[in-house]
């Protein structure tokens, strides 16, 4: 079985594009944002060269802590657990890409100091990759259903539980026997792919269809947005947009500082997710609301609150206290694999972490923290990554307020309290 597509359909659904852009569900683009969205779609329609490739793995074996694909061994706990629980007896190897053209154009836009166009095209390319993975998965579901099999949720290097350093051997397995892929793709020394808007994935296969139906976390349908699928077992239930996962690196204008996040994202997060309360003595109480999804259990929505206490402006806004906890009423955090292993010990550990306490708020801009876009809180790297983004958003909001000399008000019009 082999799928080779050099001109696949990339009709990205508007709601999926909006989700990746970070807008709330049901939001309607207007004005400049709508123009940029339409421009990005038109550019990619005329110049983009997406492609998709899939083929059946010749040999799949799970033993000890290893997953063997062909003659290569992988140490992904996530993939191993999925294959083992479903009694999988096969797998499909997949590579998809939005193409090098979009990457080159995005680079040109950034160098030409056109960050808005850069951002919308970058996010569209991300949406294209998600769309290709989804439609390829739908084709695999059709192929498997005809043969009395079920397809499992895919896993990729870089996902929690799978070291990104295993991208290179996986690409070698996918492109073995000298069969050329439909487009250029290579692994950089860091483990990242080039073009970066690409994905390598493994979809498990099992003949234990009824077993999979009982274990709903092994059904990929809840995370699959393919509307026309006739093999759907459960409804599509994608969680709230994980806006913190869509980070675009680079220098931005604003407070005269280097942020790791695009200025548009900072403005949106400061306006929609952050409330600030400046007290009479100059101290600041900040509350940031993070909405994301778990990386396992089909992406369960979760919400965390970040409470930060800062000293006065004249002291450099020193960070006096930090605390991250699940929002009142949140149950999504209980679906995280880390929580299922450690229970409330994990939540207590998260609440105790204060990575920059005692330092000026500006230290967040030079903090060499790990980069991890995982939506969950299971690993310290993903928690540090989120803390950095939260502190950058607070810094951006306070710097904007100080420059413009205007009072600070809660984003929602009512003060939030933890």
Image (cartoon, grey):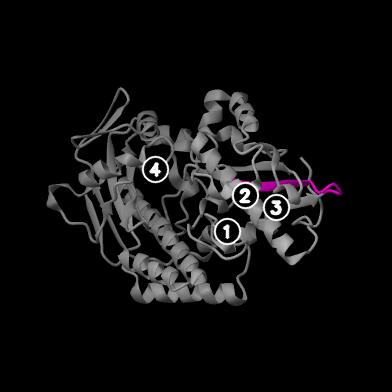
Which numbered mark, 2 or 3, is in the foreground of this view? 2
Disc nearer the start of the sequence (3/4): 4
**Image quarter in which the C terminus is found:** top right
- 261 or 125, which is in the foreground? 261
Query: What is the CA distance from the residue labelled 3 to the residue labelled 4?
Result: 29 Å
- Viewer-closest of 76 and 367: 367
Tell me if residue 285 is in the magenta stretch.
Answer: yes
Q: Look at mark 1 in the image and give the residue it sits on.
A: 257
Decide if residue 277 is on the left or right side of residue 127.
Answer: right
Task: Of the two numbered discs 1 and 4 on the same chain, state the one appearing first in sequence.
Answer: 4
The residue singled out by tag 2 in the image is 362
Which residue occupies 47% across, 45% down? 371
Sooner in the amino-acid sequence: mark 1 or mark 3:
1
Q: Is residue 25 visible?
A: no
Q: Magenta region's main secondary structure?
A: strand
Q: Which residues are magenta?
A: 279-292
Does residue 75 belong to the magenta stretch? no
**Disc 1, disc 2: CB below 8 Å?**
yes
Q: Secondary structure at mark 4?
A: loop
Q: Position of residue 35 (x, y in %)?
A: 54, 77
Q: Position of residue 323 (x, y in %)?
A: 68, 36
- Cα separation, mark 1 vs mark 2, equals 9 Å
* Quarter of the view holding residue 318: top right
* Cα separation between marks 2 and 3: 17 Å
How far separated are the C-alphas under marks 1 and 4? 30 Å
Q: Which residue is mark 3?
A: 274
Residue highlighted by disc 4: 158
Mark 2: which secondary structure? helix
Dot 2 or dot 4, earlier in sequence: 4
């Amino acid at each position: 079985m082999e799928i080779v597509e050099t001109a696949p359909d990339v009709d990205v659904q508007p709601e999926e594009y909006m989700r990746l852009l970070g807008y709330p569900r049901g939001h309607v683009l207007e004005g400049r944002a709508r123009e940029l969205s339409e421009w990005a779609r038109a550019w990619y329609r005329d110049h983009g060269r997406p492609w998709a490739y899939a083929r059946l793995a010749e040999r799949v074996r799970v033993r000890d802590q290893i997953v063997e694909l062909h003659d290569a061994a992988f140490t992904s706990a996530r993939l191993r657990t999925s294959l083992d629980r479903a009694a999988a007896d096969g797998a499909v190897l997949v590579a998809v890409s939005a193409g090098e053209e979009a990457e080159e154009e995005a680079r040109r836009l950034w160098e030409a100091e056109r960050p808005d166009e850069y951002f919308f095209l970058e996010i569209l390319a991300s949406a294209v990759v998600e769309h290709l993975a989804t439609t390829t998965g739908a084709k695999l579901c059709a192929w498997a259903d005809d043969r009395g099999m079920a397809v499992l949720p895919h896993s990729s290097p870089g996902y929690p539980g799978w070291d990104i350093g295993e991208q290179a051997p996986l690409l070698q397995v996918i492109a073995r026997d000298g069969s050329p892929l439909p487009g250029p793709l290579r692994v950089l020394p860091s483990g990242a792919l080039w073009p970066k808007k690409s994905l390598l994935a493994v979809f498990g296969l099992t003949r234990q269809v009824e077993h999979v139906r009982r274990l709903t976390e092994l059904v990929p349908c809840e995370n699959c947005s393919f509307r026309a699928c006739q093999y759907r077992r459960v409804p599509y239930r994608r969680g709230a947009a994980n806006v913190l996962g869509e980070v675009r690196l680079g220098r931005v204008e604003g407070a005269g500082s280097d942020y790791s996040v695009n200025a548009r994202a900072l403005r949106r997060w400061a306006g929609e997710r952050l409330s600030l309360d400046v007290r009479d003595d100059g101290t600041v109480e900040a509350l940031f609301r993070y909405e994301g999804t778990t990386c396992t259990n089909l992406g369960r929505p979760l919400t965390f609150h970040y409470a930060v206490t800062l000293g006065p402006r004249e002291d450099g806004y020193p960070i006096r206290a930090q605390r991250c906890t699940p929002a009142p009423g949140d149950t999504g955090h209980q679906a995280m694999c880390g929580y299922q292993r450690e229970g409330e010990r994990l939540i207590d550990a998260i609440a105790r972490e204060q990575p920059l306490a005692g330092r000026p708020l500006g230290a967040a801009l030079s903090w060499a923290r790990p980069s991890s876009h995982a939506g969950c809180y299971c690993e310290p790297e993903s928690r540090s990554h989120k803390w950095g983004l939260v502190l950058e958003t607070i810094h951006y909001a306070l710097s904007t307020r100080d420059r413009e000399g205007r009072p600070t008000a809660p984003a929602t019009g009512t003060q939030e309290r933890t």
